[in-house]
Amino acid sequence: MQVTELGCGAVVVGCMFDHRVADAYSFNMFMSAWAETALGQPISSMPSFRRSLLASRPLPSNSLDPLLDRFYTPLSLCPPPNPLISCSALVSRIYYVPAADIARLQDIAGRKHSKVVCFTAYLWQILARSANLGEKSCSMGIVVDGRTRMKNVHGEKFMENYFGNVISAPYGNLRVESLLDMKLAEVAQEVYKWLSPAVLTNDSTQTYFYYYSN
């Protein structure tokens, strides 16, 4: 946590969270509660630390679902890290995208898809265009909050205030040449295919969050 006072007298508060502790939803809960406390107001949403709600445990053998394989990639299947690439070389940027540009992408990709799906499809194609020579495939994923998908199990209020990690990361993988040849509407349809099962409330998604969240 870092507090920076600007020359004009304004103050900027910067915070950093570790995903081993909490997800972005929980981070927002913390910041909101901190702001309310600083203003002398009561905390509107008291966090719940009941880990028993989503206690991690091995999946029973009779409950395996192919959908779970689309949420995360087993570590054993990941290629070893490239020793020539330093973490210090990674660049993190925040972009502002006007609503009009998002709407234009949605017009191109098709109004039947959400803005998130259309923009993700656009980013996926950009990644494919920037792929290095020799790269045959390109992956894209989206982090999905599982609280609303678990409210039927433990109750909406319990899950709204749960502090921790309740996320999944559904993803898709296509050949680079395919992504470059496809129209934006076709890529959006591919995004919808692997994203929609993760955002729907059903037994499969609830099973995943129950066994893999913390």
Image (cartoon, rainbow, N blue to C red):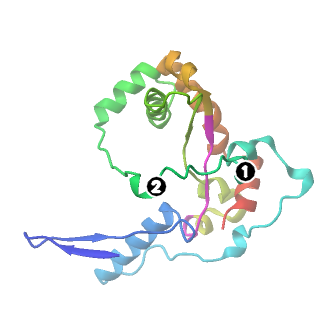
In the image as oriented, which residue stretches furthest toward the left?
A: 8
Residue 110 appears anywhere in the view? no
Q: Is mark 2 on a helix, strand or loop?
A: loop
What residue is at 62 percent from the left and 33 percent from the top? 173
Give the amino acid type for the residue marked by disc 1 in the picture.
Pro
Q: Mark 1 points at which residue?
A: 74
Are there few (<14), some (14-19), or many (20+) residues within 10 Å of tag 1?
Answer: few
Residues rendered magenta in the picture: 160-172
What residue is at 10 percent from the left and 73 percent from the top? 9
| Magenta residues, dominant SS class | loop
Q: Distance between the residues labelled 1 and 2?
A: 23 Å
Q: Is mark 1 on a helix, strand or loop?
A: loop
Q: Foreground: 129 or 208?
A: 129
Look at the image and say whether residue 182 sits in the magenta stretch. Answer: no
Position of residue 79 measured from the top left corner of the image (x, y, whole percent): 66, 46
Q: Mark 2 points at which residue?
A: 86
Position of residue 29 measured from the top left corner of the image (x, y, whole percent): 45, 69
Q: In this view, does 114 lie above or below 28?
A: above
Q: Is residue 200 above or below residue 187?
A: below
